[in-house]
Amino acid sequence: ASESPLSRARHYVLANLGDELTVDRLAGIAGLSRAHFSRGFASMTGLAPAEFVLQERMKRAAKLLIANRELPVKQIAALCGIPDNNYFSKVFRRTYDTSPTDFRETGMYATRRES
């Protein structure tokens, strides 16, 4: 059984979080129009494509912060596809209610806020 175009795009996101992942690019990978892809992806994952990408990037960042304490936060941000450190910190704080540095120091991954 081959996977659906939407699943293929979802797996691509998970395997390529460090790359630029625009909705247009993902729609192309799925072989769908942008509008059709966005609707289908949102109904499959419960999130708009851009939100899904951001959420997965934050999950990866949290894992990297805990598992690789020697890596600078700036490098982790880049590995998660967010080269702008200020933007990374802002999104991370919005997701986990703490800064990446504090998260790493306290291991606050258990208190993630669902929104």
Image: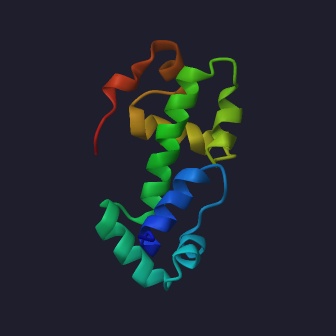
Q: Residue at x 28, y 45 (%)?
A: 115
* Coordinates of residue 10 in the picture (x, y in percent): 47, 61
Q: Residue at x 34, y 31 (%)?
A: 112
Q: Residue at x 32, y 66 (%)?
A: 44
15 sits left or right of 79 in the view: left
Q: Residue at x 35, y 60 (%)?
A: 47
* Coordinates of residue 109 in the picture (x, y in percent): 40, 25
Count of numbered tags:
0
Residue 27 higher or lower than 55, as above or below: below
* Coordinates of residue 77 in the picture (x, y in percent): 64, 39
Give 86 or 29, whichever is nearer the viewer: 29
* Coordinates of residue 45 in the picture (x, y in percent): 33, 60
Direction top: furthest residue: 106
81 sits left or right of 38 in the view: right
Give 40 or 115, whichever is nearer the viewer: 40
- Residue 40 is drawn in which quadrant? bottom left
Give 44 or 98, whichever is nearer the viewer: 44
- Residue 113 is drawn in which quadrant? top left
24 sits left or right of 52 in the view: right
Direction front: furthest residue: 1
Residue 85 higher or lower than 52, as above or below: above
Name the colouring of the figure.
rainbow
Residue 89 higher or lower than 13, as above or below: above
In the rendered view of the protein, which quadrant contains the N terminus?
bottom left
